[in-house]
Image (spheres, rainbow, N blue to C red):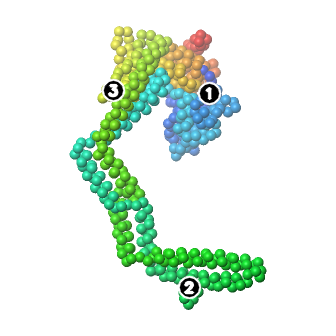
Amino acid sequence: MLSLLHIENIAVIQSADILFGPGFNALTGETGAGKSIVVDSLSAVTGERTSRELIRTGAPSALVTGTFTGVRDLPWLRDNSLSPDENGELLLQREILPDGKNLCRVNGRPVTVAQLKNLGRQLLNIHGQQDGQQLLDEGCHLEYLENFGKTGNFAEKYREAYNRLCEIEAKIKAFALDEGEKARKLDVLNFQILELENANLVAGEEEEALGRRDLLRNAENLAQGMAAVRYALSGDEDTPGAEGLLSDACHALERLSGVSSALDELRERLEENRFQLQDLAETARDLQGDLDSDPGELDRIESRLDQLYRLKKKYGDSVEKMLEFLQKCQNERDEIQFSDEALAHLETQRTAALKEAKALAVKLSGERKTAGEALALRIQEELAQLDMPKVRFQVEFAEVDNENGLNSDGMDSVRFLMSANVGEALKPIQKIASGGELARIMLCLKNVLAEGDEVGTLVFDEVDTGVSGRAAQKVAQKLSEVARRKQVLCVTHLPQIAAMADVHFSVEKGEKDGRTYTAVEALSVERRRAELARLTSGDHITEASLASAGELLDGAEAYKKTL
């Protein structure tokens, strides 16, 4: 559960420490006092999207820290080699900087916002007013159903098969050219292939040609230089070079062989150097020979480089890229020329893939329909507890209307239907549900979905919109029941709901030194009575309203003892 939420410089909250308790935690306060800022802070620390606009004016950054206790062995922790500390606590932290960057940590280890979000969703779920709009969106109904029925594994297997089918159909479509289009395409490909094949391209030839061209352009100077090198090494008929002089030295030392070991060692070293000079002289001779060329070689190289330049403008920025393009054209030509055979093979593959996808879709549909019946039953049970016993709820299935009868979600089109009054036909939920009914249906749905997950904390942000009177009391009781299994944090304006809380926080806004400040305070029993009286009667609190608030608290305590 979330035991501590520390907020620094988030909007009008300069600094606040909120010590949440187990069970049901309620937050109340005047409109605009900052209750939504607490929810925004919870969203931020669990990795949801936020904005640098949340940073308090004049502050260098904003910081939110959440301390979770009693954390189980969550999949995210195992995958990231993390665990709670020795006290069983997990510390999530997010700092928001003015440039839009975020610094996120889990138990001191830096993580990305995406990683923080994945972990946050395993710790805490936030259900806000926008969830009611999602309930009206039929595109979300299938996701709700799959979450309830835990059919995600079946759906994943189906989608893999469906994607294979789509890939095959895309290949078939690519082959589906009319004869005229095929002929035009082949003409272009044959021209490109012929031009590249006639060029007799060789990988690496351009670099070799450029090097040879540079050599030939400087052939005269290089020849003179190499002649000087050879003369220095080998000399001529009249003058000995270094090799000859070194040979004379070796012969002189041979005559002194055996006189001393030092002279013998010197002779051996001179012999080694003489052999090296001989090798250098031969290398110089070979290099000078490379400079010999026929007068037309440089012109031929320049012509080849010009040809490569023109081809590169059309087919690639290097010989290697042009060879790759040639291979691609040859493959494409073969595909077109043998398209009938390829199409036949693809059609066989398509038939098999379609059969597999349909079989999995049928299995997935069966799982969903079973889950749909169970979901409808559970929702109606929950609605009866929320003073809506006559409401009928149903999950409607329709077939996907296209050629294959399949889409990426399977063969089902899913939507939620309801009838709010006896004798009325079932209709799409968005056409008949009032605001209060919608709030209660969403509460039921969230409660049912939460039964099967391991998330320890549920946050309800003003889900009581449009609810009052007896219905409000039923919603309060339902939240209290949920809080027996999970920690519940609820932002509310209703005294019935606030009275049912195990811990009650007041969010109050004030001014100091020309700045607005918001404070969050856990209320004592007496302060709770006053706050509930304010929620009931406004600022005009009377003894009667205080007495009524006391009755609400007594009634809530009596109800909780029955759970």
Q: Along the polypeptide, which appears first: circle 2 or circle 1? A: 1
Direction from residue 44 to residue 379 in the image, left or right: left
Secondary structure under tag 1 reads: loop
The quarter of the picture where the N terminus appears is top right
In whole angstroms, how far apart are the C-alphas of marks 2 and 3? 92 Å
The reply to whether discs 2 and 1 touch (Cβ–Cβ < 8 Å) is no
In whole angstroms, how far apart are the C-alphas of marks 2 and 1? 89 Å
Q: Amino acid at mark 1?
A: Arg
x, y (%) of residue 429?
Answer: 38, 20
Q: Along the polypeptide, which appears first: circle 3 or circle 1? A: 1
Q: Amino acid at mark 2?
A: Gly
Residue with the mark numbered 2: 235
x, y (%) of residue 431?
Answer: 35, 20
x, y (%) of residue 370?
Answer: 44, 17
- Towards the viewer: 90 or 22: 90
**Mark 3 burial class by Cα count in 10 Å: few <14, some 14-19, many 20+:** few
Mark nearer the viewer, 3 or 1: 3
The quarter of the picture where the C terminus appears is top right
Residue 245 visible (yes or no): yes
The residue that appears at 38% across and 73% down in the rendered structure is 297
**Mark 2 burial class by Cα count in 10 Å: few <14, some 14-19, many 20+:** some
Residue with the mark numbered 3: 405
**Mark 1 burial class by Cα count in 10 Å: few <14, some 14-19, many 20+:** some
- Towards the viewer: 297 or 412: 297
Residue with the mark numbered 1: 72
Secondary structure under tag 3 reads: loop
